[in-house]
Image (cartoon, grey):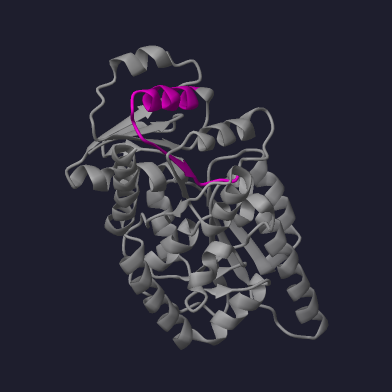
Amino acid sequence: MKIHYVIGGGVEQSDKGMFSSLASVRYRVLIPATFLSKAGHQVEIIQLAADAPVESIIANMKLEGDSVAVISKMFSPAQYQLALGMKSRGVPIVVDYCDDNFAIANGVGEQELAVGRMADSIVSGSKFLGTTIERVLQRGYTVIADPFEGPYGAPAFSPDPEAVKLLWFGNYVNFSSLYIFFEQLKIYLQNSLANGEEPIRVKLHIVTGKQEEAIPRLQQQADVFGQHLSITFTPWSPDVTWRAIDGCDMVVLPINPDQRGLSKSTNRLLEPFRGGRMVVANQLPAYAPFADYAWIGDNLVEGILWACGNRDDVLKRITRGAELIERQYSASVIGGEWLKVFQNSLEHKMDG
């Protein structure tokens, strides 16, 4: 099979191979593409700038009878135009949605709708997003989760009673979710001090892209906690993230409860368990299967306190969660699910 990934950019060549700072490109293009290539399939990744010469690219493409195109992470109309051109030459089009961008203005939402309408198969990164796809496109879909990316880490949980070490990692545009956590922490501190109790101290490590404007604003929010909350910022990279997971007691995943936030996939929950650490998270539809492993609820402070008071149970949860992720979210398992979609698309083409 020949698989053509059509993306709007974000992939660069490194000494270790292809790399992207965009999590969705790594999880939904590069990791599956690497597995499929090792499994003997031909894989091509086509990056299109907004002004790409689409007609020339199509004319020079070497398409086969078993070619399949995957449109992922839409950035420009050029991807849509290339998909149209490939479809006209008999290539099945698989469209992958990992974000709910349908309502975004400036042409992005219209572009997402257009490419979905012409797709032969549609893939969604989560069930919640899939229900939106079903509603706005009136099309069926297949859910394919993100695979884990990071290295294995032995399960461990032994927080210092003097200060619990928390980790948050992600894009700075999601800092607003941390403000929700800060508000919960503020209420907990006020109640503890009012009751004459000694509250826990929190050391929060934030791994994110370098953002000169966003980080000072977040630090200013944290300064009001004084000695009860200290924050360390580290510029993001995959290796930095894996080391940060290894060095923390647990990972906190506050969630913005809006339509776009609720559509997110499981990848930020998978990585801590893969690295052997506990997760305390707000409720997200995609997190529901992990309710017996992570602590999932409305108030993250309650989850942190529960974890600190139930160390043996936490260690068992981490161990079982890591086993589940290895069984269901490896590159081979997820890559196999993608392959089934591609095979079905080709079979429907031949039936047609």
Q: Nearer the viewer, residue 80 or 287?
A: 80
Residue 152 point in image, percent of width and height: 31, 64
Direction from residue 233 to residue 64 in the image, left or right: left
Q: In this view, does 103 lie above or below 106?
A: below
- The quarter of the image holding the N terminus is top left
Location of residue 40 (image quadrant): top left
Residue at horizontal 62 percent and vertical 62 percent from the top: 254
- The quarter of the image holding the C terminus is top left
Q: Does the magenta stretch include residue 172?
A: no
Range shown magenta: 78-100
Q: Is residue 264 visible?
A: yes
Q: Can residue 279 be seen in this view?
A: no
Q: Does the magenta stretch include residue 98?
A: yes
Residue that lies at the very extreme toward the right in this rendered image: 194
Direction from residue 335 to residue 23 in the image, left or right: right
Residue 145 point in image, percent of width and height: 43, 56
Location of residue 298 (image quadrant): bottom right
Residue at horizontal 69 percent and vertical 54 percent from the top: 258
Q: Is residue 27 above or below residue 150?
A: above
Q: Nearer the viewer, residue 24 or 280?
A: 24
Q: Which of 63 and 235 is in front in this view?
A: 63
Residue that lies at the very extreme toward the front in this rendered image: 352
Residue 7 point in image, percent of width and height: 43, 32
Residue at horizontal 45 percent and vertical 79 percent from the top: 158
Q: How many labels does the image show?
A: 0
Residue 86 point in image, percent of width and height: 37, 25
Residue that lies at the very extreme toward the left in this rendered image: 40
Residue at horizontal 35 percent and vertical 56 percent from the top: 150
